[in-house]
Image (tube, helix red, strand yellow):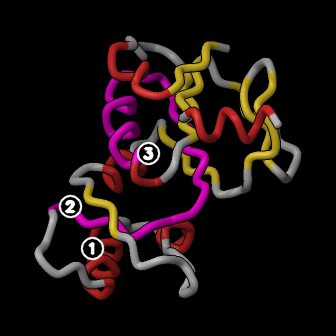
Amino acid sequence: MKVLVGDDWRSYDFTGQSVGVLAPMELAAWIVPTVVGSARSVKVFQEQPAWVLPLPVPVVRTRLARLNLRVSVKDAWTRRLLTPSRFAGRDVVVSPAYYRALQQQHCKLVAWPVYAVVDQGVRTAEGIEHRVDVLVTTHRFRQELAA
C-alpha cells in the first residue's frame, strides 16, 4: 500500500486505484471530491462529522448547514452518519462537492473509528480490514497511528 501524507495527493494519479482517505473533515472535504473523480473506489474514514456548506456565508448558521445536509444527501442513514453530535463544535466546512462525492456509487463512508494502519490498508474498531492501494492521510494521523 502506498501512503500519501500531506499535500502529496495533489500530484498523484489515482486512476483505477482503490483509495482510503483518513484526514480531518476540513481536509477530507477537499480531498474526496478530487480523488473520487478518477479512483476505482474510495473509502472515507470519518473521524468526526462536521457541518458542510457549499459556499461561504457571512454568518454561519447551523440551521443553514442542517438544511444543506437534508437537501444534498438523499439517504437517511448517510445523513445520520454525517450529522455532528449536539456536543460537537460549531465549525462549518465549506465544500461545494463533498456530499455529492460521498454519494457516488464507488465511494463509501466508514464511520467506525480507525484502529490501525496495516500493510494492506486500514483496520477499523469493529475488526474489519479495509484494503486499499493508496491511503491519503495527514501527518497528524500518521503520528497518532504509529504510536
| Marks 2 and 1 in Cβ contact (< 8 Å) | yes
The three-letter code of the residue at mark 3 reads Ala
Q: Is residue 123 left or right of residue 8?
A: right
Q: Which residue is farthest right?
A: 127
The residue under label 2 is 54
> What's the residue at 34%, 72% (across, down)?
69
On screen, residue 81 above or below 146:
below
Q: Secondary structure at mark 3?
A: helix
Measured Cα–Cα span from mark 1 to mark 3: 18 Å
N-terminal-most mark, 1 or 3: 3
First in residue order: circle 2 vs circle 1:
2
Q: Would residue 49 be counted in the magenta stretch?
A: yes
Using the image, tell me which numbered label, if any, was put on residue 68.
1
Q: Is residue 45 left or right of residue 14?
A: right
Splitting the image into 4 quarters, where does residue 146 fall? top right
x and y, in percent, of residue 13 in the image: 38, 11
Residue holding disc 3? 28
